[in-house]
Amino acid sequence: MSKKNRVQLDKLVKWDADFYKSLSDDDCIICLSEREIYLVGQVFDQLRWGNTRWAGDKSGLDFDLIASNLEYKLAERMTCEKLSDISQIINQLQITVSQLQTTVNNIANPGSDTVVTEDTQLNIALPSADATAFSTDIDVCDDDGKSALYGACVYIVNYINQSNIDFLEQLTQATGNLAQQSNILLEAFPPTDILAVDSVAKYIGFLIDELLDEYNATVTQELLQTTMCDLFCIAVSNDCTLTLYDICNYFGGKVDPTFANFATTFANLVEFASIGTFSGDMYFHYMCYFNLVSVALGQGIGLGSAEDFQLQLLAGQNNPDGDWELLCDECPTFHRLWTWNFSGGMGDFTFINLPGGTNCAVAPAGILDGSSLKGVRCGSQNTIGIIMPFNPAWRVRSVRMTTRRENGIGNGTYDYATFKMRPAANSDSGSFNPIGGGFRPNGTDILCEVQNTTPPYYWTGANQIFIAIGVAYDDSPVSAIYLDEVEILFNVGYEKLGSVAVVDDNLCA
């Protein structure tokens, strides 16, 4: 061989067989671009050239097998798409394991007889009696009592806001790592483990992509101060008592006019993050509501989540603050408004059963038709009949129903709309009718009644609400009756869960 050829051979790429033998043969995953795979792929033929591309002890090495294995792995096993799929599966498995662990913990140490899922109604998961148990403890609602109350309001608003900020900051630090973000979410808000895995992933996307920046931009000292004074005035109207129930309802009522009606389950609450149209202070109110509902649900499933909340209220109460006289406007008298729009389904209402007979099947007295209840035929009329459990201790100041009537006949013989409060369920014995009326006009109709003539200016003692609406049946064209919405105004402290604080004292004004 000439000197010239030896120089060229020395410059060729070589692999050291001795060093190659010393390395591990265990799989080691890498991710290459398509261009990089092409470049690496050009060495396959050279790997097979044992005489010119390998140095050292080559005994026992099958160069064709080495090249073929590498070619297979690059082509079939190490694509970025497959690595991404594997990563997503691992993330979902980690979320599922965390959820299962919390479920096992709850089974081992149950705190409630209620099995709570993402579709459990919030008022069932945490009854109002349980929610109101976590509250301030002020004996006399005089100026000293109000200073103690205001101190509690300052503490709890700052506590909720700071816990929101801490959570969002932790979530930001784990950007890009879904499994770690999910663990942060589950640790901060344990009831999140009742959600489906895909709901958790979508919700984290909303928190990172939208709520985080808007929360920081929205929350100002002025907004926090307004919140403190609002809660202060709500509590003053209830003899200086501020409860977990009050605060949940306050933030829920602030999010959006349709929110409190829609978000009746934890799944609804998270779904609203995807379908709701957010702006301005809604981001703050929504995050606070999510925080408080998680606390309430955590208590309902035995996680003891409300204890920290209770301690903050009491710590603030023990640090009275007289600045309410400077910073808060004169408090109005609050009441509690409960609204149910049937665009949210049946809620706590159920249909009564029709009796059967001529042109009347043994079936529910009505159907859910889009965002309304619609009457069904029974004999000579189309009718709706629904009932809802009620607490006899609740105090009703006024009631209102929104109905629609189409193609009704003129004489109105069977046209009626009744709202009854029954002392005994499924019985009209001793019942009283805030609303009862005859002929109704076609189109939308507001039926309303207020108890403002006889002390104590409220109705009470009902165990069941019964609503019956009917229109005389006429098949040319077919007459129809609808129920769109029911509203009930309560006295503070004697209201249905989900009621929001309002200053109105008369729905009919």
Image: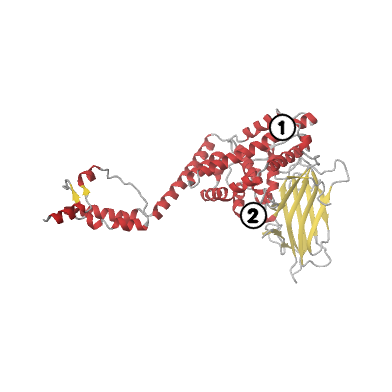
Q: Nearer the viewer, residue 3 or 369?
A: 3
Look at mark 1 in the image and give the residue it sits on: 151
Q: Which mark is residue 127?
A: none
Q: Is residue 52 above or below residue 220?
A: below
Q: Is residue 482 above or below residue 187?
A: below
Q: Is residue 140 above or below residue 281?
A: above
Q: Residues within 10 Å of mark 1 (few under 14, many from 20)?
A: many
Residue 241, percent across and down? 74, 34
Residue type beneath disc 1: Gly
At 77% across and 54% down in the image, what residue appears? 401
The answer to whether residue 467 shows anywhere in this view is yes
Q: Nearer the viewer, residue 332 or 270?
A: 332
Residue 159, percent across and down? 64, 36
At 79% across and 65% down in the image, what residue appears? 442
Q: Secondary structure at mark 1?
A: helix
The disc, 2 or 1, on the residue closer to the chain's N-terminal end is 1
Residue 347, percent across and down? 67, 50
Residue 133, percent across and down? 68, 34
Q: Which mark is residue 277?
A: 2
Q: Label 2 to label 1, Cα distance in Å?
A: 34 Å
How many numbered marks are there? 2
Q: Secondary structure at mark 2?
A: loop
The residue sitting at the left extreme is 1
Residue type beneath disc 2: Thr
The residue sitting at the bottom extreme is 476
